[in-house]
Amino acid sequence: MDIVHIPTHLIDEDKDQPRYQFDEEALRELASSIEEIGLLSPIKVRTTGDGRYKIIYGNRRYKACTSLNLPTIPCIVSTATDEMEIYLEQIAENLTRQGFSPIEEAEAFNKLLTDPKFSSSIKYLSSKLGKPEAYIKNKLDLLKFSPAVRKLIVGGTEIRKDQLTEDQLIPLKDLPMEYRDSLALIMAADEMPVTDVKRIARLFKDKEISEGTKGKLLFKTGPQLLETWSTYEHNRKERAKSAKAEEEAAAAAKFAVAESETERPRDEGIHPQASGETEENPPHQARKSPSQAARPPASGLMTLFEQDEDEDPSPGNVMESILNLLLATLPPPSRFSARDLPELDGVERDQFVKDVDTLVADLENHLEEWRSVKEMFVSKS
């Protein structure tokens, strides 16, 4: 294409072009370079029909040239008239240039999708600009944030104070508005790494944490939020581990009972009445003491010991198996302190206290039962 030198005063900036943020220091460096060796890359313009020209791309170079009061600027004159093609060309050119911010990209894509004079689609933009649809969608998601957050968004991946990268914001974009912007500002102020932002975001996405608790968490700093996540995650894993151990213990107990009943010798010649068993007085249940009948079992394991003393001695094997199982699965006491307490509120706090009460009651029942077993064993020997 031919390059022509057009008088600077006949060239106008395009106020609707995608790029509008210009770093002043970078502009001064560019102006110094142009003053020393000249403008190596011409700007592209189009005629406006009144003897003037409007910039298609090259606004930054135009600003640097005007700051030097250059009388003319080398230009490529385009004959394009289609607004859609011109705007796409402006975006494509800026995508290759340093300093085109993520939020400028997002606003440009959004304009092509929502402005009636364009009414484009993500699929069309992807094909014209050579960018994946996911890339365009991620940029559009940045527009979910408030203006206070948007002005902090910068390109690149370097974490800097009071600035936000796209990678820092992606984990927060799907959070409710009442958490999203506040968390973004906290992440910027405390220079939180992307991995930590993801962890904190999971804390606010957890449906088990009440909205009231989440609201209080917004008063914490980034490091404090990360510590809260660490504590909550530890407690969650411990609860899951405990639940799994209980399930395994119950399954083992059920299996032991089944094995005992299978191996126990049965005398088919004994009539039910001979052993004191009738429909009104079934085995085991009829011979329970009043205290046994009134006491709820501490867990699935307790039912194994609700048997008569003069019954077939084979359940002793079951008792020994359960003892070994308890010794193997019961964890050592934890030395908890006040700092280990989970941060719970409302229903969650009440449920935690209820769970502790249940655990204490179960442990006390186990303790009572095994003391009784020990006393019977010592007196028997």
Image (cartoon, rainbow, N blue to C red):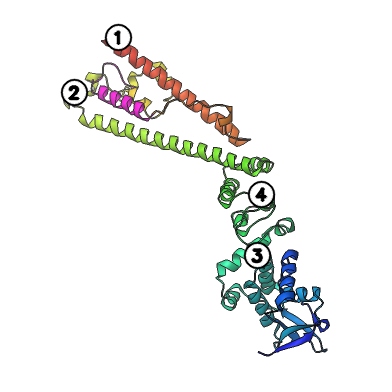
Instruction: Give the number of the mark in front: 2 or 3.
Output: 3
Q: Are marks 1 and 3 in contact (CB under 8 Å)?
A: no
Give left or right: position of 154 versus 35: left
Instruction: Give the number of the mark in front: 4 or 2.
Output: 4
Separation (CA) of disc 4 from disc 3? 19 Å
Q: Residues within 10 Å of mark 4 (few under 14, many from 20)?
A: many
Instruction: Give the number of the mark in front: 4 or 3.
Output: 3
Q: Is residue 271 visible?
A: yes
Q: Which residue is mark 3?
A: 102
Q: Amino acid at mark 4?
A: Leu
Separation (CA) of disc 1 from disc 2? 31 Å
Where disc 4 sits, the SS reads helix
Q: Are marks 1 and 2 in contact (CB under 8 Å)?
A: no
Q: Are marks 2 and 3 in contact (CB under 8 Å)?
A: no
As displayed, is residue 127 above or below residue 263? below
Q: Which residue is mark 1?
A: 379
Separation (CA) of disc 2 from disc 3? 87 Å
Pick whichever of labels 2 and 3 is earlier in the sequence: 3
Separation (CA) of disc 4 from disc 1? 66 Å
Q: Which residue is mark 4?
A: 183
Pick whichever of labels 4 and 2 is earlier in the sequence: 4
Q: Which residue is mark 2?
A: 270
Residue 117 among those drawn in magenta = no
As displayed, is residue 373 above or below residue 19? above
Span colored in magenta = 306-329
Separation (CA) of disc 4 from disc 2? 75 Å
Pick whichever of labels 1 and 2 is earlier in the sequence: 2
